[in-house]
Image (tube, helix red, strand yellow):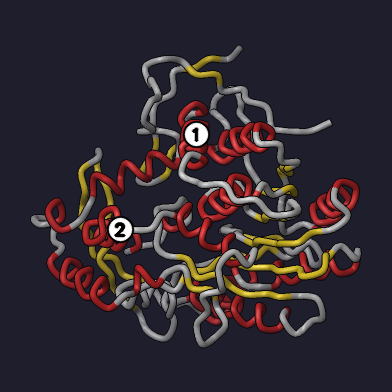
Amino acid sequence: MTDRLIKPVGRGFLFLDSHPVGCAELVNGLTEQIEARKLQQRPVALVIGSSSGYGLAATVAGLARYGIDGIGVSFEKAPTVRRTATAGWYRTAATAAYAESVGSDFHFVNADAFADTTKADVLDLLQEKFGGVDYLIYSVAAPRRVDPRTGTTYQSAIKAIGQPARTKSLAYEDGVPVVQEVGIEVATDDEVAETVQVMGGEDWTRWVDALEERKLLKDGFSTVALTYIGSELTGPIYRQGSIGAAKAHLEQTAQTLSKRDGVAARTSVNGAAVTQASSAIPGIGLYVSLLHKVLGERMQTPMQQSIALWDQLTGEKPLDLDEDGRIRLDRWELADDVQAAVRDQWDAATQETIADVADTVWFFEEVRRLYGFDVAGVDYDQPAEVDVEWPTKA
């Protein structure tokens, strides 16, 4: 037993430790939001990036909504003498326990999704247990990628393209919200290219290639890569920046993959949310806190959007596509009246007004919840067992 009293310690939006009980309760809370549906046969799904953000939501929604079997892949750190495991480690353990409780045969692999060895191991398991796959959901958010075929390490950059940009941004000092003005440098051509290598569609393509080569694509196979477009307010740093170039490549990849026989590939455009990936991008935290102030309970959670995604993938509901063939789960966010209200709040946001125009308390609590803190029903004054095993099956 290695019980510890765990407190949120870190800087900004990055915490050094995670709370295992809080992470487990967070997953349990997600499952309670879902009304089950039954299909004639359990779908087999492969989720790349299953431990956090929208990948976690898609995994839990698939399990609770349609009883999917399959495999989730993520890259998490185990507990050490000094530190807890990563939050994704604990969330995965809780997700595995839930899958077992509802009778789903779902396995979790902890490995680098970019590595060819990981693909080989996952496909071996997929072939052994299921004989093929119906759905591939690709939701990878990583700061860097090592190409296993060249050994080259690519580093993503959060920069503007064409000309420098400035944006308002939200930070916290001892829990107090601080409005900052942040300058965004222009990315070099190499930095844009490297960002595309990390966050674009090449690795997604390699997963589909590997499945095709092993003849593991079932009839009606469908794959989606999760993406984001966002507001004009965040455009210079996101959609028109180096990240946007990678997202554009992801969308082009979907069109290319869909030209293959037996492959239906699309991108799924999700709405804004508080995730470990998004909170690191300048301006996004402020924007999301303003959006929640405007929408309140009308702001759709990653779980609500993931339920909608599964309903569309399984044919329970028709695909909601735009003119470019992308699944749109973000229409609630980009509605004209919503964006107009958020822009008014954005323009009014100063250090003096921030507590009134934005949901800064909600946003900070949501960031803490990513690490298992501020979760209802958890006694944080009690020690917690940190040595939670990674879920494996005999």
Q: Give the number of the disc on residue 23.
A: 1
Seen at 26% across and 60% down, the residue is 295
Q: Secondary structure at mark 1?
A: helix
Q: Nearer the viewer, mark 2 or mark 1?
A: 2
Q: Is residue 235 above or below residue 105?
A: below
Identify the residue at horizontal 72%, vertical 81% (top origin). 258
Position of 38 relative to 193 (above/below): above
On the image, the x and y values in percent for residue 175 come to 25, 40
Image quarter hosting the N terminus: top right
Give the residue drawn at x 51%, y 61%: 308
Residue 151, position as x, y percentages in the image:
77, 63
**Which of the labelled discs sits on residue 138, or is there none?**
none
Image coordinates for residue 354, horizontal then vertical, percent: 15, 55
| Residue that label 2 marks | 298
Residue 359 is left or right of residue 103, and the answer is left
- For marks 2 and 1, the one nearer the N-term is 1
Count of numbered circles on the image: 2
Q: Amino acid at mark 1?
A: Cys
Neighbor class of circle 1 (other Cα within 10 Å; few <14, some 14-19, many 20+) is: many
User: What element does badge 2 sit on?
Assistant: helix
> Horizontally, is 358 left or right of 208 in the view?
left
